[in-house]
């Protein structure tokens, strides 16, 4: 979980950009909801990003092949989220 101070529409906009990047890198699909986004795909079996006015939470289940790259995937997602939170 990451603490943030962004208002929801601004955060959502940044997360939409992150979802586009994840689609490019991992072939994932995204479905936005009020305060969350569901992720799915072959490399990323399922995932959920949720947010409140105070925090951002990411939960992912990787596909079999992607598990070999877990640390690289985790580092990239953390890097991108840190960019969102800092901006």
Image (tube, helix red, strand yellow):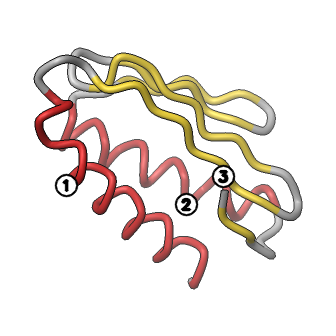
Q: Position of residue 66 (x, y in %)?
A: 17, 30
Q: Residues within 10 Å of mark 2 (few under 14, many from 20)?
A: some
Instruction: Identify the residue under disc 2.
Output: 14
Mark 3 secondary-structure assignment = helix
**Residue displayed at 20% across by 41% down:** 24
- Judge depth for marks 3 and 1 and give the one in front: 1
Foreground residue among 63 and 80: 63
Q: Find disc 3 in the rendering and name its residue.
A: 12
Q: Residue furthest bottom?
A: 86
Vertical side of 75 occupied by 12: above or below:
above
- Quadrant location, the N terminus: bottom right
Residues at discs 3 and 1 in contact (Cβ within 8 Å): no
| Mark 3 in CB contact with mark 2 (< 8 angstroms) | yes
Quadrant of residue 77 within the rendered picture: bottom left
Of the numbered discs 1 and 2, the one sitting upstream in the chain is 2
Toward the viewer: 69 or 50?
69
Number of marks present in the image shown: 3
Mark 1 secondary-structure assignment? helix
Q: CA distance from mark 3 to mark 1?
A: 24 Å
Task: From this view, report whether residue 38 is shown above or below residue 72.
Answer: above
- Residue at image position (21%, 24%) is 43
Q: Quadrant of the C terminus?
A: bottom right
Whole-percent x and y of residue 49? 61, 40
- SS for tag 2? helix
Residue receiving disc 1 = 72
Would residue 48 appear left or right of 65 to someone viewing this image?
right
Q: Nearer the viewer, residue 62 or 12?
A: 62
Q: Residues within 10 Å of mark 1 (few under 14, many from 20)?
A: few
Mark 3 → mark 2, Cα distance in angstroms = 5 Å
């Amino acid at each position: 979980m990451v603490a943030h101070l962004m208002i929801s529409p601004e955060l959502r906009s940044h997360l939409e950009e992150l979802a586009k990047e994840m689609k490019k890198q991992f072939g994932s699909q995204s479905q936005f909801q009020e305060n969350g986004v569901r992720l799915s795909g072959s490399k990323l079996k399922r995932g959920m990003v949720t947010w409140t006015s105070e925090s951002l939470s990411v939960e992912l289940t990787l596909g079999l092949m992607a598990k070999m790259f877990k640390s690289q995937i985790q580092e990239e997602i953390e890097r991108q989220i840190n960019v969102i939170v800092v901006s």
